[in-house]
């Protein structure tokens, strides 16, 4: 009877190992896909932190990440619950606020440093996201 129990255990152990191997194989592509998504987000954020080349353009960053604007947008929505445009805008506004608070640069100079074609476009953009003009923000 001891021999029969040992055989049952060996069979059960073998089945469990086979099941575990199948589970590992089934989840491996998911893991690598998640890792790739995280890598894209990490590199995207690193690109945004390069303030000397900050662009308000999803296609610009998608090209640098070797993907499409639609794919970058989908990754951002899935990972960050924001569109790629919203992530870029958040970063631009954050950088604009930093410059308004910590520098004496004029609003025009800040607009230029953030790659806006003209100051009025920058003012409208800033106001759309903050509810204040850059000058009002600086003075408060």
Image: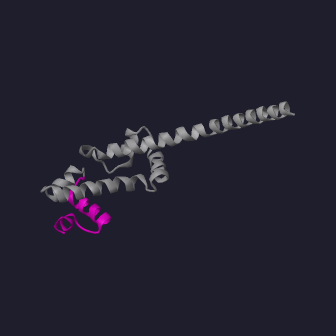
Task: Tell me which residue sits at (43%, 55%) in the image.
Answer: 83
| Residue 139: in magenta span | yes
* Structure colour scheme: one colour
Q: Main secondary structure of the magenta part?
A: helix
Image quarter where the C terminus lies is bottom left
**Farthest residue in the right direction?**
1
Q: From the viewer's perspective, is 113 left or right of 73?
A: left
Q: From the viewer's perspective, is 127 left or right of 33?
A: left
Q: From the viewer's perspective, is 103 left or right of 86?
A: left
Against 25, residue 49 (above or below) is: below
State which quadrant residue 19 falls in: top right
Residue 72 is situated, as x and y percent measured from the top left of the image, at 44, 46
Task: Tell me which residue sits at (63%, 35%) in the image.
Answer: 25
Task: Tell me which residue sits at (45%, 40%) in the image.
Answer: 67
Residue 80 is situated, as x and y percent measured from the top left of the image, at 44, 53
Q: From the viewer's perspective, is 52 left or right of 45?
A: left
Part of the protein shown in magenta: 116-140
**Farthest residue in the left direction?**
104
Residue 68 is situated, as x and y percent measured from the top left of the image, at 45, 43
Front-most of 13 and 113?
13
């Amino acid at each position: 009877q001891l021999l029969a129990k040992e055989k049952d255990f060996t069979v059960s152990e073998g089945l469990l190992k086979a099941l575990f191997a199948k589970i590992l194989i089934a989840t491996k592509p998911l893991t690598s896909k998640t890792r790739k998504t995280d890598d894209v987000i990490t590199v995207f954020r690193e690109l945004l932190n390069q303030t000397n080349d900050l662009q308000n353009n999803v296609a610009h960053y998608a090209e640098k990440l070797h993907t499409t604007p639609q794919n970058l947008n989908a990754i951002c929505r899935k990972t960050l619950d924001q569109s790629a445009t919203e992530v870029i805008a958040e970063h631009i506004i954050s950088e604009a606020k930093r410059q308004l608070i910590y520098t004496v640069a004029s609003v025009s100079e800040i607009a230029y440093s953030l790659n806006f074609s003209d100051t009025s476009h920058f003012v409208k953009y800033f106001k759309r996201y903050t509810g204040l003009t850059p000058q009002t923000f600086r003075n408060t």
